[in-house]
């Protein structure tokens, strides 16, 4: 269910917009799961899709949570994490990871500064900023201001969003945050931001509540059209 009418009003009133990256702009979560499954092969373990979308992508429990839930023995956490990182970075360098449809158009439009609906915006992600840039470059998309997770507490801590908002000169209460996960929505609300849940094929069945809900990131283009026609 979309709550786009009220969101258009909120967009009109906001001073800035923040976007999560993975699962909101980039269809990268299946590649994260694939890289972890390859990394865990030495311990004969794989992560089922539904478990990954819930416990890893949305709740952010990561490898420690997987070990705890399945009582895995003798997993070398550092080795597995290092292996996963190298595998995922390989996907990024090869250009394997796509953006969601309409994202290049959205970023170009938001970067144009030519319409009344335009707002300062920033990508704010747990993912290191160089990886975000690499994925955007391979997709020939505009690269906006961005804050990656390097040196900051990860979501559900609000640090990444707070830094991004400060870079845009906006207060959290005047900023919309677009997220796809529980940990991201939690981070936004903990920081005093207005949260927007972006539905996709992976999170549609999860129990995540937020101030607003849209059916895919492309819905923002419809909101912008509505604002600019009025």
Image: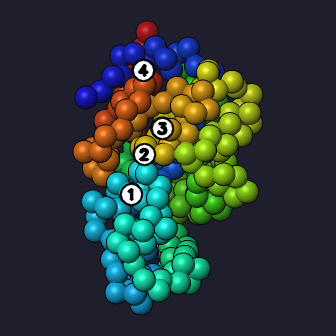
Q: Give yes or no for contact between labels 2 and 4 (Cβ–Cβ under 8 Å).
A: no
Q: Secondary structure at mark 1?
A: helix
Q: Position of residue 68 (x, y in %)?
A: 42, 68
Name which quarter of the figure residue 48 lies in.
bottom left
Closer to the N terminus: mark 3 or mark 1?
1
- Tag 4 residue: 7
Q: Give yes or no for contact between labels 3 and 1 (Cβ–Cβ under 8 Å).
A: no
Q: Tell me the CA gap for discs 2 and 4.
A: 19 Å
Q: Tell me the CA gap for discs 4 and 3.
A: 16 Å
In this view of the protein, can residue 176 be seen by the observer?
Answer: no
Furthest toward the bottom, the residue is 42
Closer to the N terminus: mark 2 or mark 4?
4
Closer to the N terminus: mark 4 or mark 3?
4
Q: Tell me the CA gap for discs 3 and 1.
A: 15 Å
- Tag 3 residue: 185
The mark lying in front, picked from 2 and 1, is 1
Label disc, if present, on residue 181 of the rendered structure: 2
Q: Give yes or no for contact between labels 2 and 3 (Cβ–Cβ under 8 Å).
A: yes
Q: Secondary structure at mark 3?
A: helix
Q: Position of residue 214 (x, y in %)?
A: 35, 32
Write the residue at 54% across / 78% down: 77
Write the residue at 62% across / 32% down: 191
Closer to the N terminus: mark 1 or mark 4?
4
- Tag 1 residue: 55
Answer above or below: position of 112 versus 56.
above
Q: Position of residue 58 (x, y in %)?
A: 41, 51
Q: Of residues 100 and 38, which is closer to you in this image?
A: 38
Q: Mark 3 Cα within 10 Å, few/some/many (few <14, many 20+)?
A: many
Q: Tell me the CA gap for discs 2 and 3.
A: 6 Å
């Amino acid at each position: 269910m979309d709550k786009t009418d009220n969101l258009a009003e909120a967009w009109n009133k906001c001073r800035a917009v923040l976007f999560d990256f993975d699962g909101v702009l980039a269809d990268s979560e299946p590649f994260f799961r694939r890289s972890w499954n390859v990394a865990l092969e030495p311990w004969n373990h794989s992560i089922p899709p539904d478990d990954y979308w819930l416990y890893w992508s949305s709740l952010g429990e990561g490898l420690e949570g997987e070990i705890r839930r399945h009582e895995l023995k003798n997993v070398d956490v550092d080795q597995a994490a290092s292996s996963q990182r190298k595998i995922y970075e390989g996907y990024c360098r090869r250009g394997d990871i796509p953006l969601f449809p309409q994202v290049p158009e959205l970023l170009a439009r938001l970067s144009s500064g030519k319409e009344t609906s335009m707002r300062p915006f920033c990508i704010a992600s747990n993912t290191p900023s160089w990886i975000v840039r690499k994925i955007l470059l391979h997709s020939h998309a505009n690269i906006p201001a961005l804050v990656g997770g390097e040196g900051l507490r990860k979501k559900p801590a609000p640090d990444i969003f707070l830094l991004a908002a400060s870079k845009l000169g906006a207060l959290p209460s005047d900023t919309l945050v677009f997220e796809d996960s529980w940990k991201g929505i939690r981070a936004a609300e903990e920081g005093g931001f207005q949260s927007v849940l972006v539905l996709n094929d992976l999170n549609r069945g999860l129990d995540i509540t937020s101030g607003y809900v849209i059916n895919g990131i492309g819905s923002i283009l419809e909101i912008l059209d509505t604002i600019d026609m009025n």
